[in-house]
Image (tube, coloured by chain):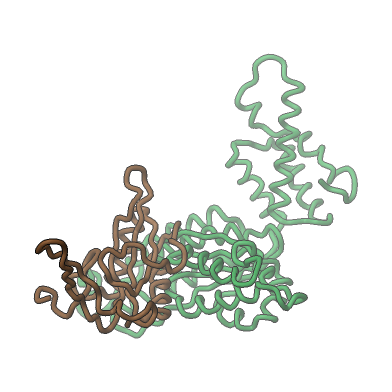
Chain colours: A brown, B green
Amino acid sequence: MMTNHGNRVTQGQFSFLPDLTDNQITAQIKYALKNDWAVSVEYTDDPHPRNTYWEMFGNPMFDLKDPAGILMEINNCRKAFPNHYIRVTAFDSSYGWEAPRMSYIVNRPKNEPGFRLNRMEGAGRTITYTVSSYATDKPEGERY
Amino acid sequence: MSDTQKTSANGTIDLQAEFAATGISEVLETLDRELIGLVPVKKRIREIAALLLIDRERKRLGLAVNAPTLHMSFTGNPGTGKTTVALRMAQILYKMGYVREGHLVSVTRDDLVGQYIGHTAPKTKEVLKRAMGGVLFIDEAYYLYKPDNERDYGQEAIEILLQVMENQRDDLVVILAGYADRMDRFFSSNPGFRSRIAHHIDFPDYGDNELLEIAGKMLELQNYQLDGPAREAMAEYVSKRRTQPHFANARSIRNALDRIRLRQANRIFESSQGPINVDELSLIRESDVRASRVFTEQGELK
């Protein structure tokens, strides 16, 4: 993919930017907490863009006042899964939203191999296209 | 005001101006005004305030600054104001800019220790995360450690606490509170705790006059007044109550006042004929105080 140098997975907020520093992450979390959103940490090793439901690392964190607790949890997750994708999600439970309001990646595998384009020939001369990650050729847990 | 304005050309600073600008003096004055007695406690709080202020100035002038450890332990007899001061402490530290949010998370053993294996760590961490940026107040902290049961999960909670107290000193302040003798035993069996807590503050018992003053203040807050004879009776009550068992300083006084209010209400209710005015409703008479069992019999108190 010529437009995505280094095959970096781009999903969620800030994913076209260089990786966020801890200070920047803290600032983002502060914003979420200011709005009373519940922040949670999730991880996965399946980078497919339609892989919406990642594994939760601990429970979502309610009633927190300060980002330090969440940053601690992020660092714990990084320690446990240094080579996984880790994202931070902020969930807005207020009526009418009830949805994640923020979601951004805070940790990625060192080497992201990118995606293969698959072509499937159908009836007549039709061709359907799909992508699959090179990483997912291997079983879960051994991908990166 | 910018840094350059505060720091004059030769690199000096005006401490008093700094002090006034932070609003700390205001906090300390309220503390003086609203909490009676507790001289050593107030002294220590002043010292901490001074240190934080000096540290801030040192930082501004480019000197090395080590963030001070502010974990504290409050020990003292029942009813000496440990919990009350802890509640204030969060606010004080916030004003001084030592903690970022200034909220207080008050917990006891139940909130930290789980019921089965693997339950304690997440529970303790949850509480710690909630307390970050503020003050974690552990009341009756000695319950965390139960020496008679070596499988007790309290030990696990203690270890996690210690680790966070050490590694994330900037993120939260832990205050332990409890009765002096039991806390001593708790610290002697957990030496790690003792050394990680910089401030061991002992809350002294109140004197008779201080207790009387406290009684006056409590009544004032509830819009009650003692008349002259009632005040004398109250002073007598305080000195008598002290000699009796289960004396718990200000807490005993609060309970006594609650009972006095009951008696006052009953007296007004039974004797009232026609309309009564505000003064009558808020006045406590000698008979309300004198009816206490402390004056009639020895021992056996409600």
Q: Which residue lies furthest to the top in this view?
A: B274
Res A129 seen here = yes
Is residue B21 visible to us here? no
Q: In this view, does B118 lie above or below B88?
A: below
The x, y position of residue A35, in whole percent, is 33, 53
Left or right, B90 with reference to B251 = left
Residue B290 in the image, given as x and y percentages of width and height: 80, 38
The quarter of the rendered structure image containing the N terminus of chain B is bottom left
* Residue A94 in the image: above or below residue A42: above
Image quarter for residue B200?
bottom right
Residue B106 horizontal/vertical position (percent): 56, 60
**In this orientation, which residue lies closer to the viewer: B58 or B109?**
B109
Relative placement, left or right, of B18 versus B132 is left
Q: On screen, B156 above or below A28?
A: below
- Residue B250 place in picture, x, y as percent: 68, 53
Residue at x 40% of width, y 67% of height: A55
Q: Residue at horizontal 76%, vertical 21%?
A: B271
Name the outermost residue toward the right: B297
In this rendering, would B290 be left or right of B20? Answer: right
**Whether residue B202 is situated above or below residue B279 in the rendered picture:** below
Horizontal side of residue B29 vs A89, given as left or right: right
Q: Residue at the location (69% across, 35% down)?
A: B227
* In the foreground, A103 or B92: A103
Q: Nearer the viewer, residue A133 or A52?
A: A133
Residue at point 58%, 42% (across, down): B221
Residue B119 or residue B19, whichever sits in front: B119
The image quarter in which residue A52 lies = bottom left
Badge count: 0
